[in-house]
Image: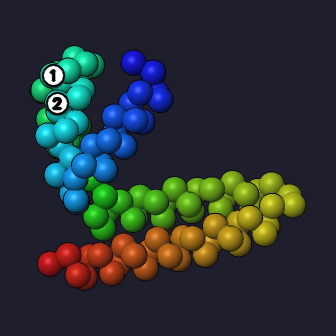
Amino acid sequence: MNAFVVYVLLLKAIGSSFAGMGSLPQIQQDFVETRRAITAEQLSQAVLVGRSTPGPIGAYVVAAWLAGIIFNLLTLSGYYDVALRDFGLLLGALTLGRLSAVYDR
């Protein structure tokens, strides 16, 4: 199955649902039952991984990743403007992580 077909099938699933997990039955029909591209177990595992990540921890992972990029850019000469831009993104990620930790209760 090529990437374009996957894109069209996911677009169809998203367009036929209103929010959240509402597209899951369409995805199951297209990928599991009709095309047999994945099994029902693989779909369940993908949903489990997708639903168990981000949150406050995801924001801190992004912040750590950006800190590594900033460090790398500062060791190279001539990329200080990009490092400064990424520092702004780092501050935004830390702020969102803190906000989601406070309001996730």
Residue linked to disc 1: 33
Q: Amino acid at mark 2?
A: Gln
Q: Position of residue 61 (x, y in %)?
A: 41, 58
Q: Which mark is residue 29?
A: 2
Label 2 Cα neighbours within 10 Å, binned few <14 / some 14-19 / many ≥20: some
The answer to the question of whether label 1 and label 2 lie on touching residues, with beta carbons closer than 8 A, is yes
- The residue closer to the viewer here, 13 or 65, is 13
- The residue closer to the viewer here, 5 or 85, is 5
Callout 2: SS: helix
Q: Amino acid at mark 1?
A: Glu
- The residue closer to the viewer here, 30 or 64, is 30
> Where 49 falls versus 71 (above or below)?
above
> Where 68 falls versus 44 (above or below)?
below
| Residue visible at 73% across and 57% down in the picture | 73
Examine the image and state in which quarter residue 35 appears.
Answer: top left
Q: Is residue 51 visible?
A: no
Left or right, residue 9 beside residue 19: right
Q: Position of residue 38 (x, y in %)?
A: 23, 22
Label 1 Cα neighbours within 10 Å, binned few <14 / some 14-19 / many ≥20: some
> Where 9 falls versus 75 (above or below)?
above
Q: Position of residue 66 (x, y in %)?
A: 56, 60
Number of numbered markers: 2
| Residue visible at 61% across and 75% down in the picture | 88
Q: CA distance from mark 1 to mark 2?
A: 5 Å
For the N terminus, give its image quadrant.
top left
| Residue visible at 46% across and 27% down in the picture | 3
